[in-house]
Amino acid sequence: MEQPKLFSLLLEKLNAELVILPDKNEENPNNTLRALWHLSFGNRISPITAEGIGLPELSDLQLENLRELIDLRLSGMPLAHLTERQHFMGLDFMLNKGLYIPRKETELLAKTAIDTVLKDFESQAKVKVLDLCTGIGTIALSVVYHCPNCQVAGSDIYEPAIQAAKTNAVHFELEYRTSFYHADLFDPFESTGHKKNTDVIVCNPPYISTAKVKEMRMEISNHENEEAFDAGPFGLSIFNKLISEAPEYLKTNGYLIFECGAGQGEFLTGRIKKNGNYSEITQVFDKNGNIRVIKAKKINP
């Protein structure tokens, strides 16, 4: 069968059978097929990258492999775990099976952090940033990539994610401006010169309650690490620590910037106001009108 015709037939199959989760809506049947086509040929690229690249001619063995990959995707295996690539802020990140897959919605957090650095610290020779709950390093490395005057340190309690973050730093040739620690939140930074000396703290914490984590779709619960989602019985445990401890590390006029779940924004804004260490609290909305990012400036003690 001619390969253009085969592509059309396989695309029809994906159009009919593929289920795209709402939080991975950058994927579609066409770019999924293109990414898996390239993977069968030996190219590991994200579906976003695959959209702009022509399709190679596949051998019979590679075509057989393609059909197997399509079956795996239709069975619920995440596309990013098949390709081992995820597009984020213009970069194709590397990740292994079992790791949390960065969501496109978190680009709103990364953009807010990048815009803050470029606007408020443009003339500063060295900007110190902490990225807590860094995962595979998507936000940390995106900030460093887009802000040449930044030095970023990240922490995460899930060791395989930290190993992936270090791999990505080398992959993007950014390891000389980043450091990653297998540890909880602020723990590794108590003795690294970050106290009262950090310009920006950014965090994409788990914010789903334990009960709701148990109800997540199988594509997520069967393939991504639970630590990336579970935020305790009320979905707020890490936020409390983040808001209360960040002032110990921020310079005066430094910023705390974090992502929150839909419906949590107003409550967390109230928590920040009550803390007394912050001013200029900014709520950043997604396209659906939900508060998804909160930014607050540390005031004089």
Image (cartoon, rainbow, N blue to C red):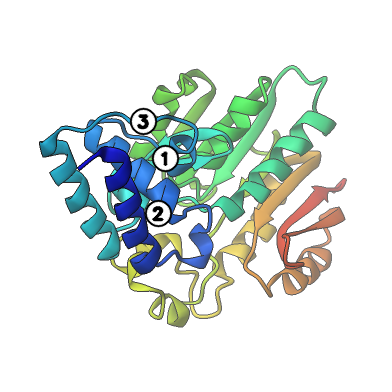
Residue in the picture at 69% in, 47% down: 248
Q: Residue 101's spot in the image, x, y percent?
A: 42, 52
| Labels in figure, total | 3
Label 2 crowd bin: few (<14), some (14–19), many (20+), radius 10 Å: many
Q: Does 247 sit above or below residue 51?
A: below
Foreground: 155 or 28? 28
Residue in the picture at 76% in, 44% down: 255
Residue in the picture at 69% in, 42% down: 111
Residue 229 as seen in the image, left or right of residue 65: right
Label 1 crowd bin: few (<14), some (14–19), many (20+), radius 10 Å: many
Q: Does 7 sit above or below residue 129?
A: below
* Upstream in sequence: badge 2 or badge 1: 1
Amino acid under disc 3: Thr
Looking at the rendered image, the quarter that the N terminus falls into is: top left
Q: Residue 147's spot in the image, x, y percent?
A: 67, 25
Res 12 label: none
Q: Marks 1 and 3: which is nearer the front?
A: 1
Amino acid under disc 2: Tyr
Contact? badges 3 and 2 (CB < 8 Å): no
Res 100 label: 2
* Upstream in sequence: badge 3 or badge 2: 2
Res 46 label: 1
Amino acid under disc 1: Ser
Res 167 label: 3
How far separated are the C-alphas under marks 1 and 3?
17 Å
For the question of whether residue 243 can be seen, the reply is yes
Q: Residue 131's spot in the image, x, y percent?
A: 57, 42
Label 3 crowd bin: few (<14), some (14–19), many (20+), radius 10 Å: some
Residue 194: quadrant of the picture: top right
How far separated are the C-alphas under marks 3 and 2?
15 Å
Foreground: 213 or 125? 213
Residue 79 as seen in the image, left or right of residue 200: left
